[in-house]
Each structure stands twice: as structure tokens, then as C-alpha cells.
């Protein structure tokens, strides 16, 4: 059976060599048992390469580049605006969205987000970025997703999503079952190299005022079907459907 090589991210590649230091090196040598002579894939968040381990000690793992690995561009660029929910569940969103190829994740404070989550979320940003890095390595992505600081819904509505540079093929907000199914709408808008933004609300859904503001800002209401999904389930289901539509 073919076993895919593990992939690691490095800060940079210089003159055909790269290195991983500190705690990450310790993890590679003590947990994954990386040794000199072994071959792995590495990425500098620009391109992916096949590389051979030169040095493997507690605080340093160094690589020599062997060859570049061709990587196809993503079929669709997705930005996920996800309402802030309890952090253990938001971490699950970050991890699974990364595995599904999301380009950008932006936490959003809504009226029904628990009080104090936005302030605390700024302290969690580095942790979310690390989760995204580990999920990117596991899923063998060539590029890390961008995990941005949280914003208020009021600052989001009325403007084009700031991390989805370029024209949007679709700007969708998840709503109740009465809204059109997202799967029925995607064929209408699909073209190569599209950018899609998805806005997912909190547990309890949107308030009437939020729903009005979101609609006025041009977000198109869609649903995932007749069942009531948890916020984190809805976010991942929507991303999976978008991915499938562009395959």
C-alpha cells in the first residue's frame, strides 16, 4: 500500500536548505522519531518540496531540498466567517476547515456570541494558527490558511469580505431550512478559480436585526437542508459542499 510522506512547514528555504528549530524540532525527533537520511515533504508556504533530513537533534532538524513537488492551484478560494462559539468547538472548526482547504477563517462576534469571547479570542489567535498549521501538515496542504483576528458583525456587513481579494462568485449566509439549498445555487455561479465567502451564525441563530443587516449587505441566504445543525457542523458541511461543487 502506498503511504504518503509526511509534510512539514518551514519558515524559509535558503540555498536549497531548510530547518525547523525549538519545540517543533523536539516534536519531530522525540515523538515522530525523525532521523538523518529520511525523506519528507516540506513547504515554505509558497511551494512544496521533497527533502532529505540532514541533521536531527533535540533543538534542530535540517533538510536538504531534493526536488520541487508540483501542486495544482485550489479549485475555489473560500473565506469562512464563523460566529464565535465556545473555544473548544471553534478550534474544531479551524482544524476541519483547514483540512477542507479553506483559504481564510475570520471569527465574528455576533449578538448571541457569549459575552467576553471576542476579547479572549485575541489571546487564542496564536493557538488557532498553530492548529491550522498542524492540520495543514496532516492534510498535506502546500499553503497555510490565514486565521485572522475576530471582528464584529457590524464591521463586516456592508463591505466586501476583506480577505477575499478579487471578485466574489458567491457571498452566502447560512439560514434556516426555508432558504434555498446551497447545493442548488452553486451550479449557477461556478466558474474556474472562483472566490466564495460563507457566513455562519452562532448557536441560536441570527437576531432579526442581524438578519436584516446581513441581507442589506448583499449576502445571499442559503440552507443546508431541513435539519437544525450545530454551528460547527454547519460550517464544515457548507465548506464540503462548496468544495464538491468545484471539483
Image (spheres, grey):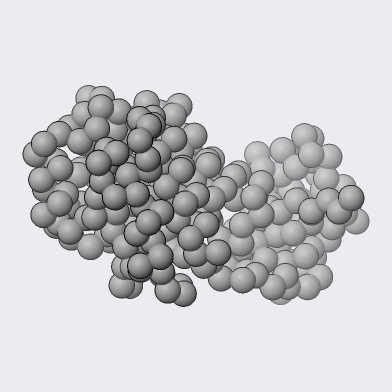
Quarter of the image for residue 113 reads top left
| Residue 77: percent from left, percent from top | 44, 63
Which residue is located at x 46 percent, y 42 percent?
236
| Residue 116: percent from left, percent from top | 25, 26
Q: In this view, does 211 lie above or below 9?
A: above
Q: Which of 167 and 140 is in front in this view?
A: 167
| Residue 174: percent from left, percent from top | 30, 44
Q: Is residue 205 left or right of residue 224?
A: left
Which residue is located at x 29 percent, y 54 percent?
172
Q: In this view, does 168 lie to the left or right of 132?
A: left
Q: Is residue 125 above or below residue 47?
A: above
Quarter of the image for residue 49 reads bottom right
Which residue is located at x 20 percent, y 43 percent?
152
Tell me if I can see residue 213 in this picture: yes
Tell me if I can see residue 90 in this picture: no
Numbered circles on residues, count: 0
Quarter of the image for residue 7 reads bottom right
Query: Considering the image in quadrants, where does the C terminus appear?
Result: bottom right
| Residue 219: percent from left, percent from top | 22, 55
Q: Nearer the viewer, residue 181 or 199?
A: 181
Q: Is residue 27 above or below residue 4?
A: above
Amino acid at each position: 500500500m502506498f503511504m504518503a510522506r509526511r509534510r512539514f512547514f518551514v519558515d524559509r528555504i535558503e540555498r536549497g536548505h531548510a530547518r525547523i528549530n525549538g519545540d517543533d524540532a523536539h516534536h519531530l525527533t522525540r515523538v515522530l522519531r525523525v532521523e538523518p537520511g529520511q525523506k519528507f515533504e516540506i513547504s515554505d508556504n509558497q511551494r512544496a518540496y521533497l527533502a532529505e533530513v540532514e541533521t536531527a537533534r533535540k533543538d534542530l532538524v535540517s533538510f536538504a531540498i531534493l526536488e520541487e513537488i508540483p501542486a495544482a492551484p485550489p479549485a475555489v478560494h473560500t473565506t469562512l466567517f464563523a460566529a464565535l462559539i465556545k473555544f473548544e468547538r471553534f478550534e474544531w472548526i479551524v482544524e476541519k476547515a483547514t483540512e477542507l482547504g479553506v483559504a481564510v477563517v475570520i471569527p465574528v462576534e455576533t449578538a448571541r456570541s457569549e459575552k467576553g469571547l471576542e476579547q479572549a479570542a485575541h489571546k487564542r489567535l496564536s493557538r488557532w494558527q498553530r492548529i491550522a498549521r498542524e492540520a495543514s501538515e496532516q492534510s498535506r496542504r502546500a499553503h497555510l490558511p490565514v486565521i485572522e483576528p475576530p471582528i464584529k458583525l457590524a464591521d463586516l456587513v456592508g463591505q466586501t469580505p476583506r480577505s477575499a481579494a478579487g471578485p466574489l462568485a458567491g457571498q452566502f449566509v447560512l439560514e434556516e431550512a426555508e432558504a434555498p439549498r446551497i447545493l442548488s445555487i452553486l451550479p449557477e455561479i461556478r466558474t474556474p478559480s472562483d472566490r466564495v465567502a460563507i457566513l455562519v451564525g452562532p448557536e441560536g441563530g441570527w437576531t432579526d436585526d442581524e438578519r436584516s443587516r446581513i441581507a442589506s449587505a448583499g449576502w445571499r441566504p442559503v440552507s443546508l437542508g431541513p435539519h437544525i445543525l450545530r454551528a460547527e457542523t454547519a460550517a464544515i458541511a457548507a465548506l464540503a459542499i462548496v468544495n464538491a461543487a468545484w471539483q
